[in-house]
Amino acid sequence: MGAGAAYHLTRRGATVTVVDGGFHGEATRAGAGIVCPWVDHPEDDAWYRLNREGARHYPGLVEELGDDIGYAKVGALLVAEDPAHLEPVRALLLRRHPGAPEMGEITDVPTPAGLFPPLSDTLSAIMVPGAARVDGCAVRDALLRAAVAQGAQVRTGTATLTPTAEVILHPEPCPPDQPERPADDGVRIEADKVIVAAGAWTGEVCRPLGVELPVFPRRGQILHATLEGVDTAWWPIILPRKGPYLLGFPDSRIVIGATVEDVGFAPRVTMGGLAEVIEAGLEVAPGLINATVTETRVGLRPVYAPGHALIAPLTDRVVVATGLSAYGLTAGPFTGEIAAALALGETPPIDIAPYAPATR
Ligand SMILES: Cc1cc2nc3c(=O)[nH]c(=O)nc-3n(C[C@H](O)[C@H](O)[C@H](O)COP(=O)(O)OP(=O)(O)OC[C@H]3O[C@@H](n4cnc5c(N)ncnc54)[C@H](O)[C@@H]3O)c2cc1C
C-alpha cells in the first residue's frame, strides 16, 4: 500500500520519502497473490467495490510499470466435494457479472484435475476465467523502483510520529510492538503530508497523535512447494469453498495457504500452522504428496476491528490507509492511489465514506 501511494504521488510530481522498517511479518511478503474479488463479501458492497476496483487497476498498472510483477490471468476454479455447495457462489457471480464483466463467463468444469493435475478427482468445479495471480514482493518492488525513478527517496528505519505529526526516522528497524524501542535519537523528515500505511503496526504508529485505531494483526502461515519439471505457471487458482487455496507460479512453484490466526504480533511459523495447511492442502490436492517443500512464509494481515478497510484523512496532515486484511494484494496498489489523492487534496477515484474511522 505504501509503495502504491509513493508511486502514484511521484507520478503527480510530489516529492516523496518512503520509510520502511522491513519488519518481519510484513503481510505483502507472505501474501499468496490471489486477485479474484467477485467471490467474496456477498453482503458488503463497500468491501466488494474496493476489491473490484483494485483488481481492475492491475492491467493498467502492469502496462505502466513494464516490469514482471508475476501478474497473470490464470482463472480460478471454485471447487467443492458436493456440487450443491457451489450454487450460492454461482448465484453471487451471476448477480455481479453485469457490473463486472471482466470476471469472464462462468462455466462448469467437469474434470478440474485436467487443469490442475494434483487435484482430487472427486471435486466439482466452476471456472472464473478473469481471476489473476500476482507476486506481492514483485509488485511492491516494481512500484518502489518506479517511484524512485520518478524522484522518491527510500529510507530504511523505524518512523515515529510526534503529537503534531512530525515524522522522526530512527535508523534501526524496530517494530513498535517490541520492547526495544528506538532511542530518541532520530532525524526529522520534512513533510507537508504524511501517509501512514504501516500495515498491522498502523495503530501503534498513530497513537502519539492521540487517536486509538483498533488495527490488529491476523497471522497467516503459508507454504511454497515445487513440483520439479512441471510447468505450473498457467495452472488456475484453486479456491475450495472450505479450506486452503492453492495457486501456481512459474518455476514449478505451488503456493498453499493459509492459516487465519489472531495471536497478536507473533510472526512465527509453527508446527501446528504448517500441519493445518499441509493436511488440508493434501485433501484438496493429494497429487502434491511428493512435492518438495521449498519455503514457508508468515505475514500479519492488517485488520481494522470494525471490519472494513480504513482509508481516511486522520488529521489535516495525516492520511491513514490500512485494514485490507486478506485482500491487500488485490486492493493495495489501488488503495495507494486513493491515499495519494487524499494527501494531494484531490478527489479520490471512489467514494471513501465507507472506509472512515468508525469512531468519527
Ligand atoms: C498468508 C497471507 C496470504 C495472503 N493472501 C492474499 C491474497 O491471495 N490476495 C490478497 O489480495 N491479499 C492477500 N493477503 C493480504 C495482503 O498480503 C495484505 O492485505 C497486504 O499485503 C497488506 O499490505 P500493507 O502494505 O497494508 O501492509 P504490509 O505489507 O504489512 O506493510 C506494512 C509495512 O509497514 C512497515 N512499517 C510498519 N510500521 C513501521 C514504522 N513505524 N516505521 C517504518 N516502517 C513501518 C513494515 O515494515 C511493512 O513493510 C495475504 C496475507 C497473508 C499474510
Image (spheres, rainbow, N blue to C red):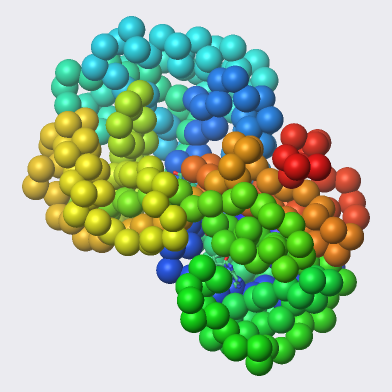
- Near-viewer residue (211 or 328): 211
Q: Is residue 253 left or right of residue 139?
A: left
Can residue 61 be seen in this snapshot?
A: no
Q: Is residue 19 left or right of residue 67?
A: right
State which quarter of the image contains the C terminus.
Answer: top right
Residue 313 percent location from the top left of the image: 82, 53
Residue 161 percent location from the top left of the image: 72, 73
Q: Is residue 70 above or below residue 259?
A: below
- Would you identify the image quadrant in which residue 51 lies? top right
Q: Is residue 225 above or below residue 157?
A: above
Q: Is residue 311 left or right of residue 258?
A: right
Q: Residue at x 33, y 52 (%)?
A: 221
Q: Residue at x 50, y 25 (%)?
A: 39
Residue 76 percent location from the top left of the image: 40, 30
Q: Residue at x 49, y 43 (%)?
A: 326
Q: Residue at x 62, y 60 (%)?
A: 202
